[in-house]
């Protein structure tokens, strides 16, 4: 008898090794499928992955939807479930896909949250650069915003991957894909200063000798700490919005586009495998253009 756990493990290996899913995306998919497994075992009398029906899955999603989860979460569950059963069909474990007809909530276009350049400056000015931690935090935010890194890429950034002579960094991104991102001379000088005058004071953990950004104990920083630092700085700067490390990445792309950069270069620097993902930033630009027309076109000033 084919069990849920057996097929979930196979699916996990498929996503990990054949699709190169990042750890975070993989974890989300696994959580979604394991929730369906638990429901099948407890509510559907141990119904297995080969016998569960479209009606069973619909009822499961209906029960979940009553718990007031966001529409975006519901859309992700459906995507995970569809992928799982599509995989089972492709592996010829099932002859049909019970998730084919599932429909997710109609989501509006997701527009990433961004900061204006003035807001980025306000956050940086809120840092106390008279302390070593302040100098490190300033350098971190300059790298986040100046290079458009994901938070995982920031905390894993290696000194050996920084080419100071040619002014670029090698980023080990999602799915083990490497990319090269240019460094502005301002950011380059700030990294050098941080390495020479701050990082050099730490007693560095042997495993972290090549990691650029370290905590005061000489170890690698965690994602959570970076989130907390940015949250505190945002509040200190008087910006009353929910800002995350990823907001700086979105701002990096949006500001490049606003200043005339080609979308394909932005795609390369962000490490997007598809130009479609990068095109979301053109919608932000279109929103801005719409506001310009509404605010400045003489026809809109007629009462």
Image (cartoon, rainbow, N blue to C red):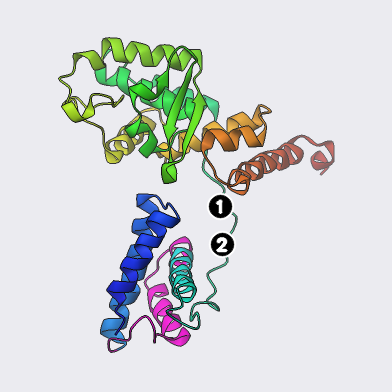
Residue 257 among those drawn in magenta:
no
Q: Regarding mark 2 in the picture, which secondary structure is present there?
A: loop
| Relative to 300, 251 lies left or right | left
* Mark 2 surroundings within 10 Å by alpha-carbon count, few (fewer than 14), some (14 through 19), many (20 or more): few
* Vertical position of residue 51 compared to residue 212: above or below: below
Q: How much space separates mark 2 and mark 1, taking CA atoms?
A: 8 Å
Q: Quadrant of residue 232?
A: top left
Quadrant location of the C terminus in the rendered image: top right
Q: Quadrant of residue 301?
A: top right
- The residue under label 1 is 110
| Relative to 206, 271 lies left or right | right
The residue sitting at 47% across, 84% down in the picture is 54
Q: Nearest the camera: 103 or 64?
A: 103
* Vertical position of residue 280 compared to residue 19: above or below: above
- The residue under label 2 is 107
Residue 59 among those drawn in magenta:
yes
Q: Are marks 2 and 1 in contact (CB under 8 Å)?
A: yes
Give the x, y percent position of residue 77.
43, 67
Residue bounds of the magenta highlight: 45-74
Give the x, y percent position of residue 128.
31, 18
């Amino acid at each position: 008898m084919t069990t849920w756990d057996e097929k979930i493990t196979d699916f996990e290996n498929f996503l990990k090794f054949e699709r190169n899913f990042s750890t975070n995306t993989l974890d989300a998919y696994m959580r979604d499928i394991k929730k369906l497994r638990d429901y099948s075992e407890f509510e559907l009398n141990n119904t297995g992955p080969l016998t569960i029906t479209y009606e069973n899955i619909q009822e499961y999603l209906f029960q979940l939807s009553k718990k007031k989860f966001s529409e975006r979460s519901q859309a992700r569950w459906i995507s995970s479930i569809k992928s799982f059963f599509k995989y089972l069909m492709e592996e010829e474990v099932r002859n049909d896909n019970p998730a084919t007809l599932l429909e997710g909530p109609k989501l509006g276009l997701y527009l990433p949250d961004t900061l204006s350049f003035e807001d980025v400056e306000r956050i940086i000015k809120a840092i106390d650069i008279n302390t070593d931690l302040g100098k490190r935090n300033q350098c971190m935010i300059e790298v986040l915003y100046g290079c458009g890194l994901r938070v995982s890429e920031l905390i894993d950034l290696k000194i050996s991957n920084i080419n100071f002579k040619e002014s670029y960094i090698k980023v080990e991104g999602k799915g083990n894909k490497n990319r090269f991102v240019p460094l502005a001379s301002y950011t380059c000088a700030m990294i050098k200063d941080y390495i020479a005058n701050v990082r050099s004071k730490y007693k560095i953990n042997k495993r972290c000798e090549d990691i650029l950004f370290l905590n005061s104990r000489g170890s690698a920083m965690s994602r959570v700490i970076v989130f907390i630092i940015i949250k505190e700085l945002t509040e200190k700067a008087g910006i009353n919005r929910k800002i995350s490390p990823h907001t700086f990445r979105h701002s990096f792309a949006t500001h490049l586009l606003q200043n005339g950069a080609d979308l394909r270069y932005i795609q390369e620097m962000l490490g997007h495998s598809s130009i479609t993902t990068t095109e979301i930033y053109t919608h932000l630009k279109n929103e801005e253009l719409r506001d310009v027309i509404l605010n400045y076109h003489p026809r809109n000033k007629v009462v």
